[in-house]
Amino acid sequence: MSEAVAVAHPNIALTKYWGKRPGAGRFPAVPSLSVTLAGLSTRTRVRFDQALAADRVVLNGVPADGEVEARAVELLARVRAASGDPRFAEVETRNDFPTASGLASSASGFAALALAAAKASGLAWDAARVSDLARQSSVSAARSLFGGYVELDAGTVAGGSPASDFLAARPIAPGGHLPLAVLVCVTSEGAKAIGSTTGMQTTLNESPYAEAWLSHAPRLHARLRAALLARDFAAMGALAESSALAMHASAIAAGVVYWTGATLEALQAVRGLRAAGVLAFATVDAGPHVKILVQPEDAARVKATAGAVPGVRRVIEASIGEGACIDATAAGVRAEAGVEAAKAS
Ligand code: PMV
């Protein structure tokens, strides 16, 4: 088969990956634990075609910009190297959620691209190998291959060189283990000022708190993982908020400031909710938007509060979702059409 369609969902890190391991490759310096979101998706079609003279990448109906295209082409080149099939590919990818929503479209985008490209090129890879492929384009994308709660270890270094070149995420609990709702408080519509790759590099190179972050993050991760496995929502939420605050504190000290006034207003509103007895916790990624973690029964009330915060433009509600998958119907229809065409000729 030389064509496949994959669907993947964004994920929100409860313990943050922030910083790459020294040396070559895209390996995280700290472990992370995320939850995959339902209801928001990226759908990607990959078609390898011998008539193409170069890869073509179309994102939301228009040619992808230089950096996104370059990263997609790198991924396709890795797939060609693995499959031995030299054909170029046409990639059509579309997000059904707003690009400036603060939901990392690179996570769902590269997860869907990795899965569709591996499938279209006939590689019989399991989800872990596809996760490793996605990680090489965007670390957070490695986690979107799986549903529910997902963990990604830090990249290991042994004797100054990588102990292994393979690093995949793995699912650690289904969403039903500890249900939660994520309320994405959208505070601005523009693209973020500092990309995450630059932001994390600057943090590790220039922050006086870089060492503190690198040693503290794994401890927070181990505690949050234990709280999740114990189904302790209050402890898990508090640790998720701590992880985000520690990540941003280290970044801010290097001049990497993603927050705006609206970010602080929303964080304050979350503290106000807790003071009123509601179990609500905040997390913030490499942007100004605040994501509130609540138990599903509190979602409606907290959404109303969040929507009234000055500077919050709208609130998107998401629940826990599934891992990336191949849309067999889409690929099947085309494959069958191809078989019919071949028979007719
Ligand atoms: O993998 P990237 O380049 O999309 O970086 C993700 C960074 C954070 O979203 C801030 C944290 C995370 O673990 O997803």
Image (spheres, grey):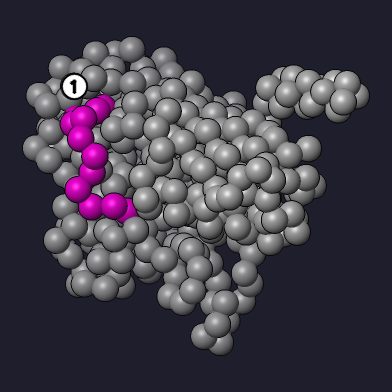
Which secondary structure class fits the magenta region best? loop
Q: Is residue 301 left or right of residue 176?
A: left
Quadrant hosting residue 263: top left
Q: Is residue 91 left or right of residue 291?
A: right
Counting from the top left corner in percent of width and height, residue 274 is at: 25, 29
Q: Residue at x 79, y 26 (%)?
A: 338
Name above or below for residue 148 compared with residue 334. below
The kind of residue tagged 1 is: Arg
Residue extending farthest to the front is: 345
Of residues 3 and 87, the one nearer the viewer is 87
Task: Please state the total of marks drawn on the protein image.
Answer: 1
The reply to whether residue 177 is visible in this rendering is: no
Of residues 80 and 182, the one nearer the viewer is 80
User: What element does badge 1 sit on?
Assistant: loop
Q: Residue at x 48, y 58 (%)?
A: 31
The reply to whether residue 17 is visible in this rendering is: yes
Q: Which residue is mark 1?
A: 313
Counting from the top left corner in percent of width and height, residue 118 is at: 69, 46
Identify the magenta region. 185-196
Residue extending farthest to the right is: 343
Q: Residue at x 49, y 41 (%)?
A: 57
> Which image quarter is the C terminus in?
top right
Q: Is residue 41 left or right of residue 128?
A: left
Name above or below for residue 198 compared with residue 278. below
Of residues 149 and 223, the one nearer the viewer is 149
> Which image quarter is the N terminus in?
top right
Counting from the top left corner in percent of width and height, residue 298 is at: 36, 17
| 98 magenta-colored | no
Of residues 16 and 202, the one nearer the viewer is 202
